[in-house]
Amino acid sequence: MTKHRRPTEPLIDLSSLDPLSRRGLLRMIGGLAAAGGLTAACGSNTGRGNGSGKSIAQWYHQYGEAGTQEAAKKYAKAYPDADVTIQWIPGDYDAKISSGLLSGDGPDVFEWHFNYQLAKAGQVVPLDDIIADVKSDFSEIDLASNSFEGKVYGIRMIDDPQLFFYRKSLLEKAGLAPPKTIDELIEATKALTTKDVKGLFLGNDSGVGWMGTQVLPATGQTFLTPDHQLGFDVETTAAAALKVRELVKTGGLLLGAPVDWWDPSAFNQGLCAMTKNGIWAIPAMQKALGDDLGVFPTPSFNEAGEQAIYLGGWSTFVSAKAKDVEAAKRFVRWLWIDQTEHQEDWALNYGFHIPPRTSLAAKATKLQSGIAAEVVALTKQFGWVDDPAWTQSMMTAFKDMASNVIVKDADASAEVTAAVAKVQVELKKLFG
């Protein structure tokens, strides 16, 4: 499996467009670790009571965009062949899904991010039969992110590029161009920081999440190779971590924001000049800032690297413990393949997202002009996705390294070496 697979097909065939999103947020990859209870879930039976006798429990994480929960209920109510109960899960969705999949009270259908362990442990079922006749309408990059040993286990629901947004007026006033290298980002962060405005918002974790999940492709490396070997070396990775530490030590990062990076509030309120965020936040940014808005990818970290954009998003799965697996698969087929009007509504009317279906993306007028079109074009050029073989345990080891180096000033080479050892142990568990 490729580590971070660069798209070999465009997310949107721009040649088909007229001349003239929510979060991926975090790479919340599945695992088998059980944690947390389900008492925080918010349930609502939204089926139509059709007398079929079939019931389906569908789980979503708590989206931040207004109207999303109501939309999910609307889709469920419209399904004619079963009563669909929506569980809207706030808080630690990863832990609740992991626990739910191991219990007998988990979801029948749920959204998440695919991981090899889900398939190897038999927790999800293949969906090749329901996607077969529209498979060519999904990009190779989205199919690969949900595939294991030639089978497709998830149907991509939305594509969510994550990158940097900036106030054009503030960079112009400082005589700065959008940063293309990490050194330029460091200098811009310092130059744009005043007593009232910080230069950059990477999140309240001092950039640990960014380093732990998104920086490596900008160093010219990958987390894993196509044959499931380590795709990064100690020296290059340690140097990147030290650059992030240098960025943090400028004092120009916004910390302690009331809401973390995935919400544009801090940026919209003028607390920072640049911010990491996702395509989903564009409507709120435009409402607050108008045309004073620009975008750039994660800058390159060395001569071997290039700019990079993490393509997050969400996919839907069927639990192997579903009360009726075939009924659950029929519902997934109905909602995420047949009901294109619901798919368009979900992707484009509650924030911006790129519809994974090429045919839908090509006619998404909201993405065909302005900054949204720029994000789409940049993602086509620089986008990458999670490798399903990069498991939660591996990601935790890498993020622990990032935290120790960036926050605790630990020795970078020693920390990366320790992370490598942990990743190798996990690879051996998976692939022998």
Image (spheres, grey):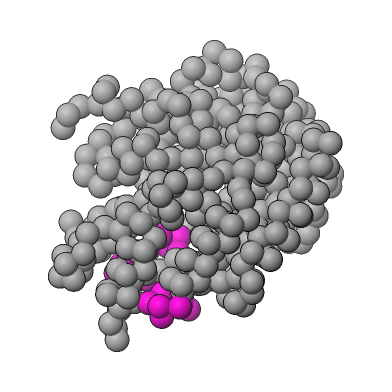
For the image, the number of numbered tags is: 0
User: Can residue 188 be seen at all in this image of the molecule?
Assistant: yes
Magenta-highlighted stretch: main secondary structure? loop
Front one among 67 and 425: 425
Write the residue at 16% across / 32% down.
Answer: 20
Does 393 lie within the magenta span? no
Left or right: 7 in relation to 283: right
Tell me which corner region of the image, top left, top right, bottom left or bottom right, holds residue 299.
Answer: bottom left
Name the quadrant of the C terminus: top right
Q: Nearer the viewer, residue 152 or 233?
A: 233
* Residue under the image location 40 percent in, 46 percent down: 306
Q: Is residue 173 above or below residue 140?
A: below
Residue 258 part of the magenta-drawn span: yes
Residue at (30%, 58%) from the top-left corner?
Answer: 179
Could you tell me residue 275's position as x and y percent? Answer: 37, 64
Horizontal relation, residue 335 to residue 174: left or right:
right
348 vs 386, nearest the viewer = 386
Q: Is residue 258 above or below residue 71?
A: below
Which part of the image, by quadrant, shows the N terminus?
A: top right
Q: Is residue 257 visible?
A: no
Q: Is residue 226 above or below residue 23?
A: above
Q: Which residues are magenta?
A: 249-276
Q: Position of residue 72 (x, y in %)?
A: 52, 43
For the point 17% across and 29% down, the residue is 19
* In the image, farthest residue toward the top: 133
Quadrant in the picture for residue 330: top right
Front-lying residue, 185 or 360: 185
Q: Quadrant of residue 396?
A: bottom right
Q: Position of residue 419 (x, y in %)?
A: 70, 58
